Image: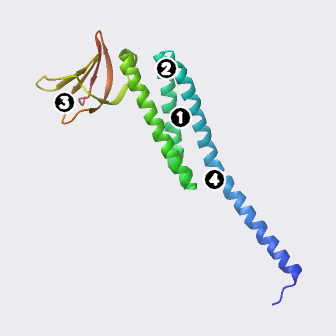
Amino acid sequence: MHLSLRQAAKLAYVYLRHSLITLAAGMAIIGLVTFPLFIMEEATQMVVFGTWQASSAKDWHTLNRGLDLAESINAHTKRVNRLLGWIHPLNRLSYQDFTAATDYWIESNRVKILALDPHAMGGRRLTLSFTPDSMTDMGDHWTLKAGLITVIVPDKPLSIPVSVSGIVRPLPSGVIIDTRPE
């Protein structure tokens, strides 16, 4: 079969048109995932800007509210990225790093609040690296202390600092974090 120049041009046009339509459809699908992730990233950045103000003013209540909001947005970002990020692998890696950095930023601000006003963390679950000034064997548990913070652990720590996680409970003279299973 021998094609005329006109027939060859028409075939090339049809092939190019279908290729461009397929490319546009693929980009639209990728955009359905990447754009919401981008908006969630922007929302997180807005929270960061607001918490700078709260932190500068030493308004721990407002800072905690901002950190709660950042945790919520970050959880949504992780969920969308985990479920649909495979559509754009480089984007998925970028948002994995972004959400990990956001987790670190949240944790470091919670530790800052605990250090500067421990009572502002009352009732919140906190995970942190703790360096005690003293350790006391209480028989069935160990009490670790540093400043206004007391941590109760079931066993003597094998290394310092100690990674602890528990709910912060206010005391008249500071706070206590009990890490023992309930």
Q: Nearer the viewer, mark 2 or mark 1?
A: 2
Per the model, the C-alpha gap separating discs 2 and 4 is: 37 Å
- In the rendered image, residue 168, in percent from the top left (x then y), is placed at 33, 21
For the question of whether residue 8 can be seen, the reply is yes
- Judged from the image, the secondary structure of the residue bearing numbered disc 2 is helix
Per the rendering, the mark at residue 55 is: 2
Q: Which residue is mark 1?
A: 73
Q: In terms of sequence position, does the residue under pointer 1 or pointer 4 come before the other? A: 4
Q: Which residue is mark 3?
A: 154
- The quarter of the picture where the N terminus appears is bottom right
For the question of whether residue 84 can be seen, the reply is no
Name the amino acid, label 3: Pro
Name the amino acid, label 1: Ile
Q: In terms of sequence position, does the residue under pointer 3 or pointer 1 come before the other? A: 1
Query: From what the image shows, is residue 90 above or below residue 60?
Result: below
Give the tally of numbered discs: 4
Name the amino acid, label 4: Ile
Q: Which residue is mark 4?
A: 30
Name the amino acid, label 2: Ser
Q: Which residue is at a point 57% across and 32% down the rendered structure image?
A: 45
Q: Which residue is at a point 86% across and 80% down the rendered structure image?
A: 7
Q: Quadrant of residue 5?
A: bottom right
Outermost residue to the left: 139
Q: In terms of sequence position, does the residue under pointer 2 or pointer 4 come before the other? A: 4
- In the rendered image, residue 164, in percent from the top left (x then y), is placed at 29, 31
User: Badge 3, how many Cα within 10 Å: few under 14, some, many 20+?
Assistant: some
User: On the picture, is 150 further left or further right than 13?
Assistant: left
- Judged from the image, the secondary structure of the residue bearing numbered disc 4 is helix
User: On the picture, is 9 further left or further right than 174?
Assistant: right
Q: Which residue is at a point 23% across and 29% down the rendered structure image?
A: 180
Q: Nearer the viewer, mark 3 or mark 2?
A: 2
Per the model, the C-alpha gap separating discs 2 and 1 is: 20 Å
